[in-house]
Amino acid sequence: MKLVVQVKLVPTPVQAAALEATLRACNDAATWVSEVAFENDVKRKFALREHTYAEVKARWGLGAQAAQHVIKKTCDAYATLKANLRAGNFGKPGSKRYRRASEKPIVFRSEGAQPYDDRMLSWQIPERRISIWTVAGRLKDVVFTARPEHLATLALRRKGESDLVRRDGMWFLNATCEVPEAPLNAEPRDFLGIDLGIVNIATTSDGEIMAGRELNRLRVRERKLRTKLQRKNTSSAKRRLKKRRRKEARRTRDINHKIAKHVVAEAERTGRGIALEDLTGIRGRVRLRKPQRATHSSWSFAQLGQFISYKARKAGVPVVYVDPAYTSRACAQCGHIDKANRISQARFACRNCGFVDHADRNSSRNIQARAWALWRRGAQSAAPDLPGKSPGRTGRKRRVTASDARCASPGPTVPGG
């Protein structure tokens, strides 16, 4: 399994200037290569190399390996754009957003990440030093810092390219590592259902609520401050908005890591698998009132799902994705589905059998039951890393059975934490 270990560089002012010049040159070259690729409709690496390789080396003073990586980075960017267009992530063909993405060449930020291979970058991990190629020559003895467990992973598992990144005036290297997976638990005794929601980010079938109302109060406060700064629209307000946006992203990432770590540890401790809803495309399917839209879209549930997935792979815990249809309206006790069962955001009371429970816990128990039924019926399969589109729905009410669910082995590769 591939994981990314991030280390922080501590360059001297002279070294930092050389690194900055290198990133700028590589990304300026990549933007020019992108224009050539777009104008000539040449998006394949070997064909594009014939058009651009010599000029990239001569014009920007890049070495052979750096020039190769610039061309490859450009081709990868167009491949990613093509996949997103096909998947509908930029809307329907002909829409304004689709045209804006497809009718002009890709432009690379001057501080965009640049890949390095072992010919351009060498590690002295015990001494916490690197030697790295730049347009100003080879820089030796560039200091880096990392946690002890990350140093051990680098020493034993580093394999492949590393990306040089500059963020908020700081320098980082993201190193790819091959980490062995734990043997998958082929016979979990049950599943731990996880309901993802807006008020309570995650609720388990054991009744544990994680990141609830206290976090929502903080999110509301942050959103009000963001609105005030956007209305002010001054240079200082824009700088503060940028700073707060990054702070919010770091907080979200940290909370998602903590939730994922706790969920996987609990499932591993009790010998259970993990059951998640397949929420692919949920933002495009649901209709919300205007006041609800910001709250609905302000949390990265896909990131949380990825964190749970890769941590589960490391621990050997199976993960099953099920259809989320009617999990909030179905009774976990008798299976009766009725919109009136959901009395409020937090309360569930079945109109058929009188069962009463916290609404999110009831949903998580339904998710648990669907995953367990699917697993027992032997529907486990080697599915793609990320859940695909949810099964289609009709207007009529129906009970969603285990055959509607889809089992997937956990697998997205994301930076480790």
Image: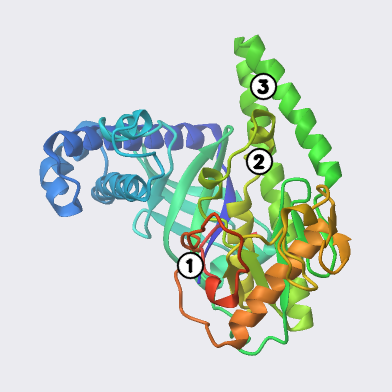
What element does badge 2 sit on?
Answer: helix
Where does label 3 land, which residue?
240
Give the mark, 3 or 2, whose residue is nearer the N terminus. Answer: 3
The residue at 62%/87% (across/down) is: 376
Q: Amino acid at mark 1?
A: Asp
From the image, tell me which residue sits under label 1. Answer: 385
Choose between 84 and 258: the one closer to the eye.
Answer: 84
Judging depth in this view, the residue of 5 and 182 nearest the camera is 182
Q: Is residue 280 left or right of residue 400?
A: left
Instruction: Tell me which residue sits at (72%, 87%) in the image.
Output: 189
Residue 263 shows in this picture: no
Give the amino acid at mark 3. Answer: Arg
* Structural distance between the alpha carbons of marks 1 and 3: 37 Å
Is residue 4 rendered to the left or right of residue 230?
left
Work out whether residue 31 can be spotted: yes
- Dot placed on the residue nearer the N-terminal end, 1 or 2: 2
> Which residue has dot 2 on it?
296
Query: How many other residues sit within 10 Å of disc 3, few (<14), some (14-19) or many (≥20)?
Result: some
Q: Are marks 1 and 2 in contact (CB under 8 Å)?
A: no
